[in-house]
Image: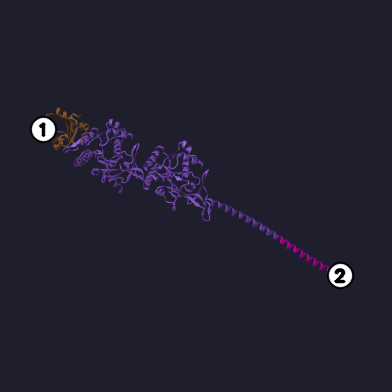
Chain colours: A brown, B purple
Amino acid sequence: MDNSADETSTAGHKFILFVTGMSVKSGHAIENLRRICDKYLQNNYELEIVDISRDSEKALVHQIVAIPTLIKTHPAPRRIIIGDLSDNEKVLKILNLSE
Amino acid sequence: MAYKKTKSQQFIFPKSPTGIDGLDEITNGGFPKGRPTLICGGAGCGKTLLSMQFLIKGITEHNEPGVFMSFEEPSDDLTLNVKSLGFDIEKLKADKKLIVDHVRVERSEIEEAGEYDLDGLFIRLGHAIDSIKATRVVLDTIESLFGGLDNQAILRAELRRLFHWLKAKGVTAIVTGERGEATLTRQGLEEYVSDCVIVLDHRVIDQVSTRRLRIVKYRGSTHGTNEYPFLIDADGISVLPITSLKLDNDVSSDIISTGVPGLDEMFHSGGFYRGSNTLISGTAGTAKTTIASYFANEQCNKNEKTIYFAFEESPQQLIRNMKSIGVDLEKHIKKGTLQIHSSRPSLNGLELHLLTLRKLIKEFQPTTIIIDPISNLITVGSQDEVRSMLVRLIDMLKANNITVLFTSLNKRTDKFRPDLAEESVSSLVDIWITVRDMEGIGERNRGIFIVKARGMGHSNQVREFVITDQGMELLDVELGPKGILTGSERQSHRIEKKMSDMKHQNEIIRKDREIERKRKALEANIEALRNEFESAEEELNILKATEELYAKLTSKKKKE
């Protein structure tokens, strides 16, 4: 996976964001993520939002403990960020997005 | 009236039986129902096992489904680990009675950016509980989360919320925690929000490790407050309460013989009570084992099942030695009435010894047990530990109405008692027999006496006994001028007595003869006197005759 950096530009980013219902933190996380993606990835990304209060099986499969949790499944490496993503700089650094 | 009042005040706190041997006894029925219980302790003291046993026994014995949320071990490892203890998790999982969820939090994989909560965990747990209608939940070990996540403030708040949530859910929960430096748990939080706190401990004293359990807190209920040793063996955890809370076992008035000829007579009732416990103490080489073997032999002859625990000799050695004095233990073993178990006391800790005894008693169902000697156990534990172990042992045996005979080796001291083992047991035993060396004038004799015998009169004498090829024999009491005589004193006393008897006899014969002689002398005297008298009489007669003749002659002359 040496050429992962190259893939970033060609194939889009894939995210799964785990939230619970209408909690405030979940709302913030969705907002923050949308803002970041719109700014740095334009439309070149896929975002799946899972509400584990309805789909609790998924929480098991992905080993979700904290809410909200963002999992970047593509490109590699897989990264997991927990929190409402309000720390903009840190999120960008983790996702390797800086322009 | 008073009785009625107390009865109306009785309120039974709802509890969930733990299914762990002995733990229900000391918690008065189990863990608080519908509330969280904290089990904390260091590594390797059995937290996971205890909680797993709680879940599994809940399912198998009380039909209460359970959820096990593991933060440390993967589900498969857990299955394997408890399988060796005879718990089949896979089957319970298939029957939808048990859910095992491994929560994995890898610090290296997770980054934190902003506020979060542990709703994910709550939802997973809630889902698991709802899907099998679980009433028992275990979280093992929740504080691993603190290792995986950074924001301590959030975690503490969430942990608190979790306890309240568990309570609101109405599940009986066990939360395990690692022991902290100064507090019971690392975070110092769980013990305050839990309704019941149990501390497990694993200590090594004198190279022997013992696991202990203590109930630190139990809201709304009384509980045993001591530290209770517990064991992990092939059947899981069993806690051994230090003392049975009641002393209400049935007692028997049957008398059983000691098997030693002469010893029975020292008890007014002619032997021990069935179910009593007897201590035979004495210094080295005072025939404690011999007395014990005699008792074993006697019981076996009456078809009473007997177990002989030998901490000093191997069974073969014991059999050989006893054969030399005419006690055949081998035939009883062949018949199946006797078992001899030999082990070194240092082989395992006291608790394990106790457990072994317990197991054997359960399996073999003996009516008689001999432990030879208990003093050897002191090498394994401190005096207190030995005492507590013996108390529990005696309680257990009493409850089963088993007759016990302990031997105890005394140290040779000037005071010759009390010794460690004696001190710790003597108040517990019903009958205490002491065998003693009686040393003096270049020889050693053995004496036996009864120190105490609860509920029966007994002799106050120190009886000498001898061991010959024919066996053991109590000798008759030989009273000398200064008390009871033993050994060569006894013999010399006997000889002296014989001699004086003979002398006496001779004296009588001599006196008889003297009288005879005197009588003879007297008779001779009488004869002599009589002879004298006769001769005097004769003389007189002659004189008289002469006189007459003279008178006749003179009268004739006058006539002429």
Q: Quadrant of residue B152?
A: top left
Image height of A78 relative to B464, above or below: above
Question: Which span is picked out in magenta?
Answer: B523-552
To the question of a shared chain for discs 2 and 1, the answer is: no
Q: Chain of mark 1?
A: A
Q: Nearer the viewer, residue B487 or B480?
A: B487
Q: Where is residue B9 shown, x and y percent of the image?
A: 27, 46
Residue type at numbered disc 2: Lys
Residue B120's disc number:
none
- To which residue does mark 1 refer? A39
> Helix, strand or loop at disc 2?
helix
Q: Where is residue A44 shown, x and y percent of the image?
A: 13, 29
Residue B556's disc number:
2
> Helix, strand or loop at disc 1?
helix
- Relative side of B328 to B243, left or right: right
Q: Residues within 10 Å of mark 2 (few under 14, many from 20)?
A: few
Residue at 45 percent across and 36 percent down: it is B336
Residue type at numbered disc 1: Lys
Residue at 36 percent across and 47 percent down: it is B384
